[in-house]
Image (tube, coloured by chain):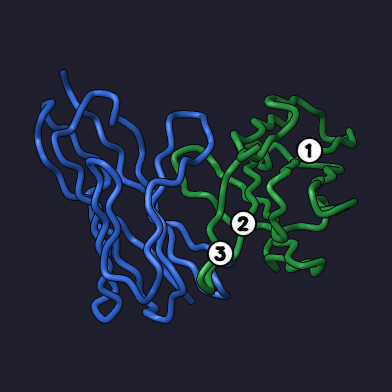
Chain colours: A blue, B green
Amino acid sequence: KQEVTQIPAALSVPEGENLVLNCSFTDSAIYNLQWFRQDPGKGLTSLLLIQSSQREQTSGRLNASLDKSSGRSTLYIAASQPGDSATYLCAAADNYGQNFVFGPGTRLSVLP
Amino acid sequence: DTEVTQTPKHLVMGMTNKKSLKCEQHMGHRAMYWYKQKAKKPPELMFVYSYEKLSINESVPSRFSPECPNSSLLNLHLHALQPEDSALYLCASSVRRGGTDTQYFGPGTRLTVL
């Protein structure tokens, strides 16, 4: 059974810092890994999806990497802004990407 | 139209009530999902309706029942719920590209069971 963990559980940084969020998964037989952002009480916004054959994906100030062999993914946020404050969830997917197992999330606060 | 819509946004119901949550997408996606998310916890998959086939998480109690009237709509029928069923219920749909599905989430329905 797939298990997904994320560290740190919470992170508080001053504005402008670069930061790294970590995601680990136990079963490397995944189809893709997706990073989401969730604001309090809201739905999930997809940030980046990395297919199992890919090593990284980039979108603006975000860069996500995937190392299937070690069961790890990282989300790098450059030049953080207060608007980046949210909970960041990673999800590992099997069954063609339909069976998602989410990590517990990292709660990020970027201080002005 | 590139979004998943959910109604209602908020729902308060008693344990003897019967209610339904609605999820709709017009992106032509062939798979739709229901997730349950408790406060400060990650979403947990409840049901997948993919290419007209229903998959159920075995841990979901029978007081929750999905219905897919057509490929754009996925309802979640609620009956005799318990207070511990109070949560954010998220719907998603997905499209297959390059051999894998990308999921798109709706804003959720906040359910409170009294």
Q: Residue A82 at what x, y percent from top left?
A: 23, 23
Residue B47 visible in the shown view: no
Q: Nearer the viewer, residue B33 or B24?
A: B24
| Chain to which mark 3 belongs | B
Figure check: B11 above or below B23: above
Discs 2, 3 touching: Cβ within 8 Å: yes
Q: Answer few, some or many: residues within 10 Å of disc 3's Cα (few below 14, many 20 plus, some between 14 and 19).
A: many
Quadrant where the C terminus of chain B is found in the figure: top right
Find disc 1 in the rendering and name its residue.
B21
**Which three-letter amino acid code belongs to the residue tagged 2?**
Ser
Same chain for the residues at labels 2 and 3, yes or no?
A: yes
Label 1 and label 3: CA atoms lie apart by 24 Å
The answer, for residue A6, to whether it is visible in the render is: yes
Q: Earlier in the sequence, mark 1 or mark 3?
A: 1
Left or right of B105 on screen, residue B49: right
Residue under mark 1: which chain is it in?
Answer: B
How far apart marks 1 and 2 lie (CA) works out to: 19 Å
Q: Which residue is mark 3?
A: B101
Q: Nearer the viewer, mark 1 or mark 2?
A: 2
Of B40 and A82, nearer the camera is: A82
Q: Position of residue B54 (x, y in %)?
A: 78, 66
Specify the amino acid type for callout 1: Leu
Q: Residues within 10 Å of mark 1 (few under 14, many from 20)?
A: many
Label 1 or label 2, whichever comes before in sequence order: 1
Question: In this image, B10 relative to A87: left or right?
Answer: right
Quadrant of the drawing holding the N terminus of chain B:
top right
Question: Which numbered marker is on residue B94?
Answer: 2
- What amino acid does circle 3 point to? Asp
Which badge, 2 or 3, is on the more N-terminal residue? 2
Looking at the rendering, which quadrant does residue A32 occupy? bottom left
Q: Specify the subunit that label 2 lies on.
A: B
